[in-house]
Amino acid sequence: MKKPLPMKNRTPEEGLTALTDDAERNRLLAEMAEQSTDMISRHTPEDWLFIYASPAVTHLLGYTVEEIVGISAYDLYHPDDVEDFRLRAPTVSYDRGLYTHTYRFRCKDGHYIWLESTSRTIRDPETNDIREILVVSRDATHRIMADKASRRLARVLESTQDLVIFANLDFTVSHLNEAARKALEMECMEYSSFPLSRLVTEKGLATLMDEGFPAAKETGSWRGELAMQNLNASRIPVLLELLAHRSLHGDIEYFSLVAHDLTEKKAAEDQLKQYQAEIDHASRLVTMGELASSLAHELNQPLSAMVNYLRGIERRFAGKPTLSWSDIELPITRSIRTALRAGEIIHRMMDFTRKQEPVVTRLNLPDLIGEMINFCESTAERHNVSVVFEPDLNLPDVKGDRVQLEQVVLNLIVNAVEASASADRRDDAAIVRVRVAPHESGQLRVEVEDQGRGISEVDMSRLFDRFFSTKETGLGMGLAISRSLVENLGGELWAENLPTGGARFSFTLNITD
């Protein structure tokens, strides 16, 4: 007769199948119990009482062999699993072989673990009645939890609105979630594996290859903005999170790309930029409206001078049959210079109010400030205020848009003039001082000091809010827009009260490289 295989060379199923009589069963059970970390147990067929358990029961459930014998398995099932097993048990036909099922089982300390058990009936050879049930059980908690986590992750991946892409080490795509298939127009497309380059623009692919994947391999992740593309080559701006997934041994197994669609955000930013340009333009028009009387005065002077020059020529040479150039050269040249001056005033006003895209260039800040002081000179004179500016000619250039910086400087000077004029003063004239000086971190600082009443503590916190103004007729847009323009150029704008009275408004600008 062929000698049976030793137990250590058999699977648990082969071991159970080999059980034909009590002696063989007991011998194999003892051998299995000593060598296996799985729990081997015997149960009564009706109420599933433990009549035997291998020593592994202590490691698995916390019970000693003596403690577990006599306890019904039904008493240790999880409440959500026991009824299901009761209902299924009568329908299970054990004479067809082995039966494997997974369930939660209570340990001695009260917590539950998942067990995977393979059962086999032991029958009476004469009556074929079930005498007992032999079970081999192993801890399946880790696998069950991993499966549940995988299912949860799969549900999250399919429900998220972000585009999720899994890529192999050769940069081919292995999986796309529903959002990615929809955004990339691949819903009806059958695919197995295709190059990642089909899903990103040429520039985006270069960014991934040069920055993304090297960083993910080194640190585990990379984050950046780039453009993806669908099958019709339409661009999709995204914020991409690239992750490298490693095995337990530390080797990279695959990459995942989680892309947040920025299409709506970019459209909103473009619209906001357009609105900001409209508001800035409106602010310049309001500023020009506030300076209208001063501009009229500035234009009135050269125009009146031209009229006087020409009337002088008319009176002096009326009725004379001949004229020489020497007779009229002086009034004519003066009229030309005066006309050019009036034209400069008009062109300056048109440039300031013209709606145009910002152009960042190198600017000489003292020259720009000097022009703005001349621009509002009539306003200062009308308010009996003197604007004092002593420029440092050795300062470096700054980076900025000329029209935007003119708007900021003009707003601050006009505000300082009006604040100084509104204060009760005993002397004849108030003074507004303008300074430009080096600031920290490669910047220049512009300061505009007035001799007004200063800023109250309540107003200081709201000073740069839109539509807040300390003027009775103010729109509350000038300072808010000025701060926005300065910050867009990488600087800051702030206000503070002076110890001697009045206020100081300061802003910084970056020096050109």
Image (cartoon, rainbow, N blue to C red):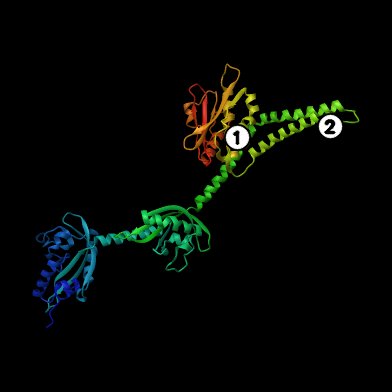
Q: Position of residue 258 (x, y in %)?
A: 42, 56
Q: Position of residue 413 (x, y in %)?
A: 58, 30
Disc on res. 325? 2
* Frontmost residue, 168 versus 46: 168
**Dot 2: what SS?**
helix
Residue at position x 49%, y 38% in the image? 442
Does residue 513 lie above or below 184 as drawn?
A: above
Quarter of the picture holding the N terminus: bottom left
Disc on res. 480? none
For residue 175, say whether it is visible. Answer: yes
Q: Which residue is mark 1?
A: 368
Q: Position of residue 111 (x, y in %)?
A: 20, 55
Please identify the quarter of the rendering in which residue 281 is found: top right
* Frontmost residue, 466 versus 217: 217
Q: Looking at the image, tell me whether mark 2 or mark 1 is earlier in sequence order.
A: 2
Is 196 left or right of 46, judged from the image as shown? right
Q: Amino acid at mark 2?
A: Trp
**Dot 1: what SS?**
helix
Residue at position x 66%, y 29% in the image? 294
From mark 2 to mark 1, how far is it between C-alphas?
A: 39 Å
Is 307 left or right of 217, judged from the image as shown? right
Does residue 343 lie above or below 256 as drawn?
A: above
Does residue 317 lie above or below 282 as drawn?
A: above
Please identify the quarter of the rendering in which residue 343 is found: top right
Q: Amino acid at mark 1?
A: Leu
Is 117 left or right of 336, judged from the image as shown? left
Taking the view exactly as shown, the residue that stands out farthest to the right is 321
